Amino acid sequence: MFNDCRLALDELGDSDAREINGIIYVLSNGTGKQRANVRGTARQVHKWRIALLSNGEKILESHFQEKGLVVKAGQEMRMLQIPVFCNYGAFDELHGIKDGRLFSDTLQNNTSKYYGAAGIAYLEKLVDDGQDLGGLHEAALSRFISDDLQPQEKRAARMFALVALAGELATEYGITEWSKCAALEAALMCFDKWRNHRGAGSIENRLILESIKSFIDRFGDSRFTATNYNSAVHTVTGRAGYHAGCGNERTYLFNELD
C-alpha cells in the first residue's frame, strides 16, 4: 500500500522489542517472506521501497535493553534516530498558537479534515519533471558530505539528502510555499542532530567499547586481579584478566580468549 511513499508508524514503545528487532530489517530491506500457495508452488514475493517514519519516547537502545537485547549496527542505520530539539518540543514555530500542545491538537484536527491534495499535486508534478533527479540528489548530497564523515555517516547522508531534495522539489512545484533552501537547511539540521546523538566513529566500534566498559563496571573487582597480587590471600573465580595502577589511571588487561 505504501510502496514508493512514506509509511508512518506511531509510538515505537508500544511494540514488543523482540518484534521490532525483526520488523526494522523487514521494512527496510523491502522484501516479504517466500510463501507457498494452495497448490504448493511459490507465491510471488512482495517487494516495496518506502520511507519509514516513526516516533517514540524511548530510544531503541533503552527499549531493547528492557528485553535484554542489543541494538545492532544495521538496525541503527536503517532507523536513524533524531532527538527532539526544537523550542516547543517537535516545533520551532507555533504560528500564533499559544503553546505546543494546542498547536499539535490543531494540526491533528486539521489533518483529519484536509489531506491528500498536496500529495497528489506533488506526484503529478514529479512524473512530468524532466530534470536529472539523480544529478539533483548528488548535488544535494554534496551539502552533507565532509572529509570527517565515516562510511556509515555517508550512507545516512544519502537518506537525508533525498528528503532535502523532495522538500526542495515541493517548494519548486509550488506545493509548500516554503522559501528556497528551507527544506535543505532543515534536513542539514536534522543530520547534525543525528550525528551528535549517534556519536563519532563507526557504530560497531562504539558498541564494542560500550560492551567492554559495561563488563568492567559489572565485574571490575570480582573478575580482575591486580598485577602485584598475593596469590596466598587473593583468589579469583573465572578471572577475566588483570589490572595495573589505581583510580582513574587503572589499566585493564584482558586474558586471551580460547
Image: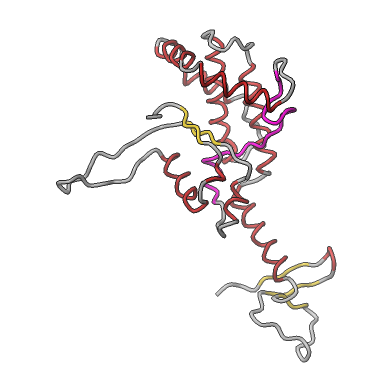
Is residue 244 a member of the stretch shown in magenta? Answer: no
Location of residue 255 with respect to 34 vertically, above or below: below
Specify the farthest residue to the bottom.
Answer: 232
Q: Nearer the viewer, residue 117 or 35?
A: 117
Q: Quadrant of residue 149?
A: top right
Percent x, y for residue 110? 56, 18
Seen from the viewer's position, the closer of residues 250 and 218 is 218
Q: Position of residue 45 (x, y in %)?
A: 29, 40
Q: Is residue 83 magenta?
A: yes
| Residue 78, position as x, y percentages in the image | 51, 41
Rendered image quadrant of residue 77:
top right
Horizontal side, residue 61 vs residue 74: left or right: right
- The number of numbered discs placed on residues in the rendered structure image is 0
Point out the image quarter for the C terminus.
Answer: bottom right
Which corner quadrant of the image does residue 70 belong to? Answer: bottom right
Q: Which segment is the magenta one?
A: 72-94
Q: Along the horizontal axis of the image, is 29 left or right of 167?
A: left
